[in-house]
Image (cartoon, rainbow, N blue to C red):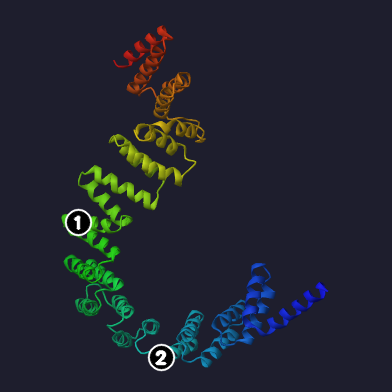
Amino acid sequence: MFRIAAILLLAAVLIHAEEDPRLNFAIGMLEMSRGNASEAGKRYETARLADPLALPLVNLAVDQRMAAGDRSGAVKLYRDLASARPDDLGVQLTYADFLDRHSNGDSLALKLSGEVLELTLGKNPGHPEIIRRLFLHAQAAGDKPRQHELLEMLSNDDTAAVLLFTTLSKAMHEATNAEAQARVDDRYLVSFEDHPEDPVLARSASEHFRDTGRLEKAIGILKQHIGAAPASLDLRTRLGILYFTAKMDTEGESALLEVLAIHPRQALAHQSLAKFYRLHGQPDPARFHAGELLKIRGGSPADFIKLADEWLAANDPREARLLLEKSVFDHPDHRELAERLAIATRRDPETRDTAARLFRQAEGIDSGEGKTNPDFLIEFAEALIAEGQGKLAEERLRSAIRAYPAEAKIETAAALRRLAALWESEGRNAAAARALQQRADSLDH
């Protein structure tokens, strides 16, 4: 009984599939995922025949015909769809683009594409995407008057139209053409005056004036925009950077710090401030902002190690530890990062008691090089001594002494004296401890 019901249900699904283009499309997608392109193609075609005006289904059918070398059949599919949906902008542009893309120098196809676009422009006056395509046609034909005519059809009230005007105008004219540049200036200024809150327009206008050497105007655009849209943090950040470019350092620093007061995770603001402070010999704030940038964006192990070493050298193990905790999360199997984290954790009074575990974990990571950092071994030994494990500490100190290169005399001497002091504190190896002291003294001379 259940078997009969299943058969009837399957039959119902198959019958329904013949009528439902969505179901056929879904089955086609499933067959394609299984690698059954032939069956998928049949399903797509069945779906298209059931819904011949659906652009996605026509696109699939066109792809199939092009793959089979049937260009005329593909053109007919788009032509029929465009005729059936004359007011659908997306369909008309898809048809025109197909003709352009596959014209292969066929003047008839290009002519037909132009006619489709002209007809569509008549129904959608001033539409940037239509004008862009017609401009390219005129450019290919060397028709300058038509290019100018098309540019003048672009509105000042539409951001996309203003941006297209500037792009196409710059493509037409040399950068030294003062008249063309003035017309671009006017387009930006008139449109921006009406829409100062538009971030896309503000950014493009500011970059235009910056690129043409008018920094003061570029800054003014962004200031006016921020007055109209105070929450525009990206452009607040760009304003700070522009201030730095214009040698207005106080204003730039203030602007970027204000951004971070609003949103502390603005990566570009941290990056710009880190660079600014380094250039001006202020290592402390430079380290802070470089660290915040790494925490936000991440970085390579070498990036983390370099900055962590700066924090450790500045006697701020807490900041080094916080940074390295992020680095080990990003790179859990990196031996050197794990070693640095253990060192910073031991040096930080807040976390010193938890450091031994991190030293052991770091020691268990295979670096693939067979080498151990002697500074890590020294620090590990100190953590073991704090736990009362003198014998284990002695092993690390001996390993560190062997690991130091010959030129590291100061470090080797310090390690020798630390091992001697350990023996003396434990009341053992008195003669050997004296010998170590003498050896350390010899390295000092």
Q: Amino acid at mark 2?
A: Glu
**Where is 250 relative to 412, above or below?**
below
Q: Specify the label residue 254 is tagged with.
A: 1
Q: Residue 254: x percent and y percent?
A: 19, 56
Quickly name the residue at label 2.
118
Circle 1 packing at 10 Å, graded few (<14), some (14-19), many (20+), is few
Look at the image and tell me in which quarter the C terminus lies: top left
Residue found at x 34% / y 39%:
320
Which of the numbered marks, if any, corresponds to residue 297?
A: none
Quarter where residue 211 is shown: bottom left
Is residue 443 left or right of 227 when viewed as pictured?
right
Q: Quadrant of residue 143?
A: bottom left
Residue 166 seen by the camera:
yes
Q: In the picture, which quadrant includes the N terminus?
A: bottom right
Residue at the outermost front position:
1
Q: Choose mark 2 or mark 1, whichever is in front.
A: 1
**Between marks 2 and 1, how big is the CA–CA gap?**
52 Å
User: Left of 11 or right of it: where is 144?
Assistant: left
What amino acid is found at the position of numbered circle 1 in the picture? Answer: Ser
Image location (x, y in percent) of residue 329: 45, 45
Q: How many marks?
A: 2
> Where is residue 428 shown, x and y percent of the image?
43, 10
Picture residue at 22% right of the left edge, 73% below the top: 176
Residue 54 or residue 257, whichever sits in front: 257
